[in-house]
Image (spheres, rainbow, N blue to C red):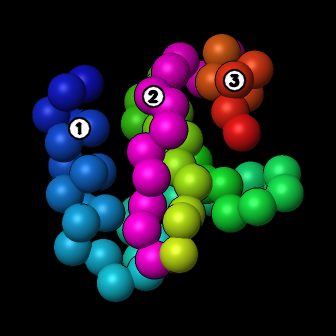
Amino acid sequence: MRRRLDQVIQELIEADNITEVTGVSRLRAEGLHYRIRIGDYRLGITMDGETAVLRRFMPRGEIYRYFP
């Protein structure tokens, strides 16, 4: 799991735009909140200008209780 998370983070670093990252989906909540599916886990991301802020990495059944 750690290796897959590291790959996603590296892809975020190299991307010019969040939409270029594989598997990213925008959430319907207010603001610029995104999630990336990594197996049974989800990585919650908030955009602050052009900076992606990694907020949560939790199992899919729990993340939506805490994020966004």
Residues 30 and 59: in front is: 30
**Magenta-tinted stretch:** 50-61
- Which one is closest to the eye, mark 2 or mark 1? 2
In three-dimensional space, the C-alpha distance between marks 2 and 3, rounded to whole angstroms, equals 10 Å
Residue 6: image x %, image y %?
A: 18, 42
* Residue 55 magenta-highlighted: yes
Task: Name the secondary structure under disc 3.
Answer: helix
The answer, for residue 30, to whether it is visible in the render is yes
Amino acid type, label 1: Arg
Amino acid type, label 3: Tyr
Mark 3 — residue? Answer: 66
Compared with 43, 60 (above or below) is: above
Asked whether the beta carbons under mark 2 and mark 1 sit within 8 Å of each other, the answer is: no
Residue 7: image x %, image y %?
A: 19, 49
Compared with 41, 13 (above or below) is: below
* Residue 19 magenta-highlighted: no
Task: Name the secondary structure under disc 1.
Answer: helix
- Answer few, some or many: residues within 10 Å of disc 1's Cα (few below 14, many 20 plus, some between 14 and 19): few
